[in-house]
Image: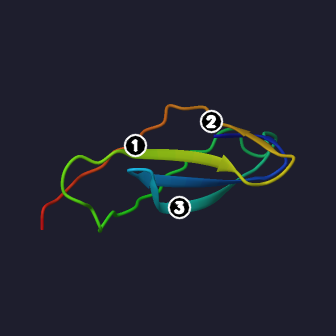
Amino acid sequence: MAGVTDISQIVFRVFRNGKEIYNTQDGVELADSKQNYIITFQAIDSNLIAGANFYQVFAENITPNTQANIVGPISFSGLAIKS
């Protein structure tokens, strides 16, 4: 991510089968301060249901009148372990 104007607060949301199961928030400063951010987070989906599941990750800027760009690439991976 790269800050463009002011300080943005970005919320990352992870959805399983259309239902939000995790979220986290991180701040991104304007471009003059730091050019690029590498944002990482980990989450455990402990209520996994049997069968095929569909996951999505969204990034949302929740600070009005600010802008941050996703530079990419974006990497998302998961591992299912049977207990």
Measured Cα–Cα span from mark 3 to mark 2? 17 Å
In the picture, residue 82 is in which quadrant? bottom left
The C terminus, quarter of image:
bottom left
Q: Which residue is mark 3?
A: 23
Classed neighbour count for the residue bearing mark 2: other residues with Cα under 10 Å, few (<14), some (14–19), many (≥20): few
Q: Which residue appears at 45% of the width and 57% of the height? A: 19
Q: Amino acid at mark 1?
A: Phe
Query: SS at mark 2?
Result: loop
Mark earlier in primary sequence (2, 1): 2
Mark earlier in primary sequence (3, 2): 3
Q: Amino acid at mark 3?
A: Asn
Q: Which residue is mark 1?
A: 76
Mark earlier in primary sequence (3, 1): 3
The N terminus, quarter of image:
top right
The image shows residue 60 at horizontal and vertical percentages of 65, 48
Q: Which residue appears at 27% of the width and 62% of the height? A: 48
In the picture, residue 62 is in which quadrant? bottom right
The image shows residue 15 at horizontal and vertical percentages of 45, 53
Q: Which residue appears at 59% of the width and 46% of the height? A: 59
Q: Which residue appears at 53% of the width and 61% of the height? A: 23
Give the vertical position of 5 relative to 17 (above or below). above
56 or 40: nearer the eye?
56
Q: Which residue is mark 2?
A: 70
Classed neighbour count for the residue bearing mark 3: other residues with Cα under 10 Å, few (<14), some (14–19), many (≥20): some
Q: Amino acid at mark 2?
A: Ile
